[in-house]
Structures are given as structure tokens and as C-alpha cells.
Amino acid sequence: MSTHKRKRGGQGPIEKKAKKVKFVADGGEPPGETEQEKKNEITVPAPVSQGKWTNKERVLIFSSRGINFRTRHLMQDLRTLMPHSKADTKMDRKDKLFVVNEVCEIKNCNKCLFFEAKKKQDLYMWISNTPHGPSAKFLVQNIHTLAELKMTGNCLKGSRPLLSFDPTFDKEPHYALLKELFIQTFSTPRYHPKSQPFVDHVITFTIADNRIWFRNYQIIEEDASLVEIGPRFVLNLIKIFQGSFGGPTLFENPYFQSPNMHRREIRLAAAARVREKQMVKEMQKLKRTEAKEDLDRDVTADVFLTPAEENPVHIETEPPQPKMVKKNKHKAFKRQRMARR
């Protein structure tokens, strides 16, 4: 029996109706449907969330020229943690910081994390609300990236984090301002297209030693314990400005010490230690010489010495007469004496 060949574009021997797709919003069924039509329909459930993306926060993360590999990896880690971030090319050192506002406007970003490198060893971070401000400048210390730490924690890429703040953020006004900046910058907007609808990690901002400590932890479902993921770094506040990357100073940290002064103090302390060692060596040398002098001169050596009587000095004007020695011619030799015995 030969099979029936269907021509291209033609109808086969068995006519099948294509299945229709029906989207059900509230679970109800439209009236007036026959049993055959119900069989040919595929019901697709409504999405879990009908929310709209209203918080249009976008963060621009980039840096100046002269950064090292550690800073570059830190920037990449922050872009991975923040799905609402954007990247840009490095900015030239000769450009003023006000140019960053124009870059953010071109990139359609209203928040900015700008890393500024100086002397190829000092890293400063600007966090700003562009273009009107406020902005804050930090010195970044103790940087440890994701690739360097190799922690056991892990989280879904693009998931929304919980932000945990130290209670000190609510006690002082400048910390309250920084808290609002951190919330608007690091929190992932709800219903963002690149975000995931899960909360599986928490970002903590802790204040200790007049510095802000940044940590990222995974939330384990079984017992709600925390496992660190990374990255980690420490922010040392320098100034808070009213404008974006400039303007009147709202707050200046009195405990901040510049890296140049810190290195100068380290060098002075090292030089002081060297001078102290040299002084100790000189003192030990002086003590050794004094001890040798004391040993050479014995104080008790002349205790029992009595002064001798002084004899009158006799000066001979004439040479003494030579003594006459008479030889005994009859004295026998030693051999003869020995033979007589």
C-alpha cells in the first residue's frame, strides 16, 4: 500500500485544526465555547507579577585612567551585583570632575560610582546623585574581590539584595544622608528587566573605627544563616558636597588622614627606630670603654705601699777604676779534678 504524498502547500488527507492559545488573566472562561474548541485550546497561566518597572534608577560605574587590576576587578564585581548599572570608558585625568555629569546625562543615568586613582596606589570613590547632588568622596581601603576571596557563598546573578545598615546611620545626620545615597544606588529597582524576582543575598554597611565596612552575604534557606560571597572593601569618608562632584561642603570628616600623611608618619617612625638603634649602639660602646679603663687601673693596688726614704743624690765626676782579676795558674782543670777523685 503506497502512502499518500502531500504536495507543498496542499492539504493532507486528514484535516486537523490548529490549536489556539488562550491567555487567562483571572482564571475565568469566556462564554459560548464548544467542546471541540476547548480541546483545541492551550491555556497559558497569567504571569506571577503584573507589576510595572517604575523606579528608573540607573547607575553609571566607571573610573579614571591609572587604576590597577584590583580596582578593575572590583568594578566588574559591582556591575555583576547591580543589574541596573552601566559601564563606560575610562575618563582622562586632565578632565574636570564636572564632566562626569555630562557623561551620566549621555548615558541616561541618575546615579554614579566613579573611581579615581592617584599615584597608582591610592583609590578614591565618588558616589553622586547626578546632576544636582549631593555627592560624597571616600578613600577605598582593604579591597578584596570575588576572584581573590574564593568564598563558599553564592547567589543568583541579578537577584535583588537586602540592604542592612548599622544603627549608627540613624543617629547622625551625615550618616543618614549617606544611607539614603546607598539605598538609591545599591538597591535593585523592582521589576527591572535584568533583575530576578528572588532575594537570596544581603549587603551590609557597618560602621566601625569611623569607617564604613561593605560586605555581601548569601542567605541560606535551611537555617537562614549567612555565608560571605564578596567583594569586600572599607570606605573612609572624606567630605560630603551639596552638588554633584563639587559645591559647598556639607560635612568634613575630622578623623580622616590622607594617605600621604600616613606614609610620611610611617617613614618618620622607621627613621626614629633607626636613630634609636644607633644611639643604643653608641651608649653600649661608651659603656664598654669605661669598663676597660676601670679594669686597667686597680684602686686597691697601692693600699699597702709605703714611701721609701729619699737618699741623697751622689754624682761621680771621675770614672771608676777597673778591678784587677788575678788568674790562678795552678788551678787544675775540671777533668783533672774529676780524675783525682
Image (tube, grey):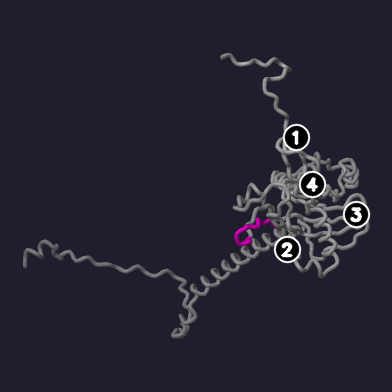
Residue underneath mark 4? 25
Q: Earlier in the sequence, mark 3 or mark 2?
A: 3
Q: Nearer the viewer, mark 4 or mark 3?
A: 4
Disc 1 element? strand
Image depth: mark 4 or mark 2 in front: 4
Foreground mark, 1 or 4, reads 1
Tell me the quarter of the image containing the N terminus: top right
Q: Are marks 3 and 2 in contact (CB under 8 Å)?
A: no
Q: Secondary structure at mark 4?
A: loop
Q: Which mark is residue 34?
A: none
Along the viewing direction, whichever of 43 and 204 lies nearer the viewer: 43
Residue 65: quadrant of the picture: top right
The dot on residue 133 is 3
- Give the x, y percent position of residue 253: 82, 63
Q: Which mark is residue 20?
A: 1
* Residue at 59 percent of width and 52 percent of height: 152
User: Would you say 310 lies left or right of 96 here?
Assistant: left
Judged by depth in the image, the label closer to the viewer, 1 or 3, is 1
Give the amino acid at mark 1. Answer: Lys
Q: Are marks 4 and 2 in contact (CB under 8 Å)?
A: no
Look at the image and give the residue range highlighted in magenta. 215-225
